[in-house]
Amino acid sequence: VDFDKPIWEISSLPPPMHTMDDDVVSNNVLSTTTTSSSSMMMIPRIETFPTWAKQLLSDWGDINEEEAILRATSITITTTGDKTRTASVASSLAEKGSENTKLSPYLRWGVISPQRASKAGVRTRDLLWRDWSRVSYGLLNSLRRGDAVLEFMDRSCRRRFDSPRSELNDSNNDNNNNSSNMSEQGTTSTSEDELFNLWCVGNTGSHLVDAGMRQLWNEGWMPRRIRLLSAACLVEGLGIDWKRGRDWFERTLVDHDAAINEVMWQNAGLCGVDPFYSGIAWEAPPNGWEEEEYAEKWIGSGFSGSGGGSGEGSLAVWPSYLKTWATKVPPLQIVDGAESRREVLRAKGVYKAARTIGNAGVRVAWKGLANNNSATNNSVEEGEVMGVGFVPVHELRI
């Protein structure tokens, strides 16, 4: 197959960026300033930011190539004046063999290149995941549109808030009905918006999920493993549309990447190109001293995060519409009904379908298959989904 190398035309370079002068700051000007020669983008000083933004940026420290290289080489700079360098250790909060160096924002914004990060010791798999997400995003029209890659799976995890006992009414298996009722216990008086707000502020009752969501708002970041647990909590546990989680992450992540975020959330919604982590136990308690310290840091001593807590996350400056939800006590059934919810999805065949997608793969129409009549369908536009494995898209069912 002959591939044409894409060529991008650069019309002009962006204007130079400068730190705001004192007179500009005093006039509270946070936009571009036009001079006689060019338009220069002003970088506002950190002192001009609101408390929340000021604290977030201060916590990140230096944002430069030297800091990025130190993080890539698993070395961190302490906040002490002597800039002592200390080696970090493998983290149980990350993928096996990976480390939580908080390097992703530096990669996202081009402070360090993937090649440089790889040479510095960053695990190749972590870098390839980013590239794979962007390749998928470029090939599939539905990802760029923000629509489910596999429509037949799009609402497979959604809870029927208006009829909480109806999820398995179409099933003749009485045993399944019992688990369905258990999965909905205690949520009949809690709306989707209320559950979503509790999730946003880290008040679900799941220690790791709550710690992660509070870290997300305070720092604009969370470990990849905690992102997966938080997504599973929202979609599989609470039965809320994955798009709401995607949009919240877009708003709060400092390393937000449209391709990576879309691919991750569609996979979490079990309607993406590789729903590998379906059925993950998002409600499991912290395992090991590191996860316990992580939970304690963000939701307080003894994991008293429910209803406010005493950790760093309790000091968050929430938007006005979320403040009350940060101190509420979440319904116990959110965590207690987690396994029952998985039983419901398992009985409906959702997890089986997710495994089939991961094993067989998603077929996408593209010009490279134009001459292979057995593997393509001329009625499907380039970039659209043709099917899963050898099953055409119009025959896909749960």
Image: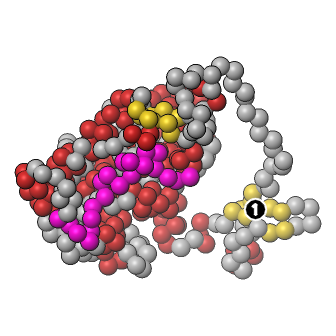
Mark count = 1
Which residue is more in the foreground, 260 or 188? 188
Q: Which residue is mark 1?
A: 41
Q: Nearer the viewer, residue 381 or 124?
A: 381
Q: Is residue 23 left or right of residue 68?
A: right
- Whether residue 1 appears in magenta in the rendering, the answer is no
**Does 157 lie within the magenta span?**
yes
Q: Looking at the figure, which quarter contains the C terminus?
A: top left
Whether residue 362 is visible to the viewer of this picture, yes or no, is yes
Q: Percent from the top left, x then y, of residue 122?
A: 48, 31
Q: Tell me residue 334's x, y (percent).
A: 20, 62
Give the amino acid at mark 1.
Answer: Met
**Crowding at label 1, few (<14), some or many (≥20) Cα neighbours within 10 Å?**
some
Q: In the image, what residue occupies the spot 52% across and 60% down?
A: 57
Q: Secondary structure at mark 1?
A: strand
Magenta segment: 145-165
Is 59 drawn above or below residue 7 in the view shown?
A: below
Q: Is residue 128 above or below residue 321?
A: above
Q: Position of residue 273 (x, y in %)?
A: 44, 39
For residue 307, above or below residue 358: below
Front residue of 266/373: it is 373
